[in-house]
Image (tube, helix red, strand yellow):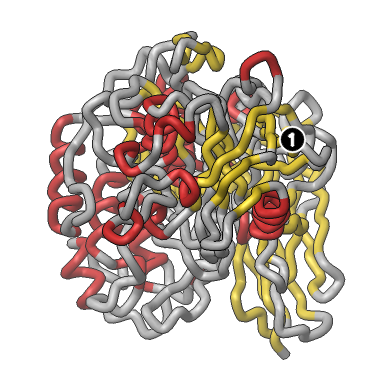
């Protein structure tokens, strides 16, 4: 429901939860028709054979766009190259039938080579953090402010209330049998002690495994008559994604372990205990601020921490491929969309009609829906032309006019921001309006993809023909993988000088003259000829790109080719290369 509504949900639908309206939501292509194919099951996942059957069925049913918010667990071992795995081979057949394919990049970031989508005929989508963030804070009785996550109302009258820890509110010997600290079971806690106070709960592994939820804490606190709740993370769980959860009473999650220590120190120093350690008087007070309204930031979009990163790999031994992945960045963090009230995937949204979710699974349907709009405007375009329109018009600067940045881990596992590269965002952040009028496209046919597969070093030609039904040898001789006519250039081993060609086709309704400029890291020289060209409507022209290794650094160099039209179009092609002598 969530993913389908992102791609094609109705326009301007008020998102209401707990009596509060969070704004109006719209799918990318509200009038598109939706078909959903079930291939995965909760906790278990699914089989690749089921996914392949669904892809074939969808193509047979006549879909125009396929969205795959799924991917294999790791690069395939059964085929010599990642591009011939059953997933990608089935999708190549879909593209041959004229179906555009968007696939989630994967959620293995921010580490390199974590993508689960490999092939150039697929549009691989990375997840961006947009300008809307939900923040909240706790005000302690000693004047300290502690930042946290909580999409919740403020404590009544913006006042402070007494704080009581779940461990100090236990009934009898409950603690021996159950952990009451995560506040999932109200019957373990003393209502008389908790009533009118803020309940302090601990964050345990149960939240990560899905057996505990913030929603359940809010229900516990409400049933005990608490004024609100605080859930505090005492131990760090590396790789855990903390997303804010909308709740109907004042509540906050403190994710910073050092801030939790400040809170617990304050609580302990304000609580009187008897000789046996039992609490006899509670003097700690806290207030929870209003966290219902989002804060808007100019440093957006950013590449989300969890979004899988390139470089792309061509085989199970993780050898670098001459294909840029991901292809494009789309919103994938804290995305509001439809939710099935009887859905069991996320305990925090059980019974709700909307949910706010994060993942490249949420980014891919943005691209699928925008592709549907392009397909509607240009029904005869091939999937590769649609992909080219999306990529060549993407943005590499944020709302604040700075280069895009990517969330990364620092050495101490704290989140930092670093300048993003094409391995984070592909060609950049999607720009739907520009994609509907790209000026030029770089198109590729099914035969071009077969030639690409046959050009991969060490590929088995019989494997190509067995899997695709097309034989090697019918395409041009001496092709290299990076000769495929896609809107990016990636040379993983640039030895000396290499020449690459790209063909651009004018899809606008008038002739346009383009001036060509290049920008590249100093280790690699990037030249393009001709320096300018005029392309007539419906005609194609070829550009020749020369890459030269100036110095060997053992790392990738990044740059771009920009084609600026004399009417209104701007076409960008990212260039990635690693120099060798």
The residue drawn where x is 16% and y is 58% is 47
Q: Position of residue 516 (x, y in %)?
A: 79, 47
Q: Is residue 50 left or right of residue 347?
A: left
Residue placed farthest to the bottom in the image?
Answer: 581
Foreground residue, 480 or 123? 123
Q: Is residue 574 left or right of residue 117?
A: right
Q: Position of residue 99 (x, y in %)?
A: 31, 38
The residue drawn where x is 68% and y is 77% is 578
Q: Quadrant of residue 9?
A: top left
Residue placed farthest to the front in the image?
Answer: 275
Foreground residue, 418 or 93? 418
Q: Is residue 107 above or below residue 194?
A: below
Foreground residue, 174 or 221? 174
Q: Quadrant of residue 302?
A: top right
The residue to which callout 1 is attached is 139
Identify the secondary structure beneath mark 1.
strand
Density class for disc 1 (Cα within 10 Å; few <14, some 14-19, many ≥20) is: some
Say if residue 344 shows up in the picture: yes
Q: Position of residue 301 (x, y in %)?
A: 68, 39
Q: Is residue 268 left or right of residue 351?
A: right
The residue drawn where x is 40% and y is 32% is 191
- Quarter of the image containing the C terminus? bottom right
The residue drawn where x is 55% and y is 64% is 235
Q: Is residue 67 above or below residue 323?
A: above
Q: Position of residue 87 (x, y in %)?
A: 26, 58
Q: Is residue 179 left or right of residue 112?
A: left
């Amino acid at each position: 429901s969530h993913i389908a509504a992102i791609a094609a949900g109705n326009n301007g639908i008020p998102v209401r939860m707990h009596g509060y309206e969070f704004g109006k939501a719209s799918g990318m292509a509200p009038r598109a028709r939706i078909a959903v194919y079930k291939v995965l099951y909760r906790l278990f996942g699914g089989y690749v054979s089921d996914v392949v059957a669904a892809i074939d069925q969808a193509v047979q049913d006549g879909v125009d766009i396929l969205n795959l918010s799924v991917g294999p667990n790791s690069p395939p071992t059964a085929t010599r190259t990642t591009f011939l795995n059953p997933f990608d081979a089935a999708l190549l057949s879909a593209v041959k039938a004229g179906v555009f394919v968007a696939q989630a990049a994967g959620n293995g970031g921010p580490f390199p080579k974590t993508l689960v989508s490999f092939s150039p005929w697929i549009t691989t989508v990375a997840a961006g953090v947009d300008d809307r963030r939900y923040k909240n804070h706790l005000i302690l009785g000693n004047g300290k402010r502690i930042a946290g996550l909580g999409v919740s109302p403020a404590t009544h009258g913006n006042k402070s209330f007494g704080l009581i820890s779940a461990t100090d509110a236990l009934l009898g010997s409950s603690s021996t049998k159950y952990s009451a600290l995560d506040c999932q079971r109200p019957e373990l806690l003393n209502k008389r002690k908790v009533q009118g106070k803020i309940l302090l709960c601990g964050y345990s592994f149960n939240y990560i495994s899905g057996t505990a939820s913030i929603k359940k804490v809010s229900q516990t606190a409400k049933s005990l008559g608490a004024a609100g709740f605080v859930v505090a993370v005492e131990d760090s769980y590396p790789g855990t994604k903390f997303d804010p959860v909308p709740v109907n009473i004042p509540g906050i999650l403190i994710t910073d372990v050092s801030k939790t220590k400040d809170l617990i120190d304050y609580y302990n120093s304000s609580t009187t205990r008897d000789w046996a350690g039992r609490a006899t008087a509670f003097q700690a007070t806290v207030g929870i601020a209003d966290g219902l309204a989002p804060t808007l930031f100019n440093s957006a979009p950013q590449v989300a921490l969890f979004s899988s990163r390139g470089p792309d790999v061509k085989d199970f031994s993780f050898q670098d491929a001459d294909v840029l992945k991901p292809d494009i960045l789309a919103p994938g963090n804290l995305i509001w969309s439809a939710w099935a009230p009887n859905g069991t995937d996320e305990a925090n949204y059980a019974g709700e009609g909307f949910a706010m979710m994060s993942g490249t699974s949420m980014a891919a349907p943005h691209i699928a829906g925008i592709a549907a709009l392009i397909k509607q405007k240009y029904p005869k375009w091939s999937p590769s032309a649609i992909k080219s329109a999306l990529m060549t018009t993407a943005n590499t600067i944020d709302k604040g006019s700075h280069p895009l940045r990517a969330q990364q881990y620092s050495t101490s596992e704290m989140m930092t921001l670093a300048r993003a590269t094409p391995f984070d965002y592909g060609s950049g952040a999607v720009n739907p309006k520009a994609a509907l009028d790209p000026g030029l496209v770089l198109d590729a046919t099914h035969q071009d993809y077969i030639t690409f597969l046959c050009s991969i070093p060490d590929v088995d030609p019989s494997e190509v023909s067995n899997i695709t039904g097309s034989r090697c040898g019918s395409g041009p001789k001496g092709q290299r993988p990076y000769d495929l006519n896609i809107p990016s250039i990636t040379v993983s081993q640039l030895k000396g000088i290499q020449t690459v060609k790209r063909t651009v086709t004018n899809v606008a309704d008038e002739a346009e003259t383009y001036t060509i400029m290049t920008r590249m890291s100093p280790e690699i020289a990037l030249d393009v000829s001709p320096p300018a060209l005029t392309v007539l409507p419906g005609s194609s022209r070829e550009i020749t790109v020369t890459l030269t290794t100036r110095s060997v650094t053992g790392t990738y160099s990044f740059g771009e080719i920009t084609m600026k039209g004399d009417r209104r179009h701007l076409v960008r092609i990212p260039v990635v290369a690693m120099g060798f002598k």
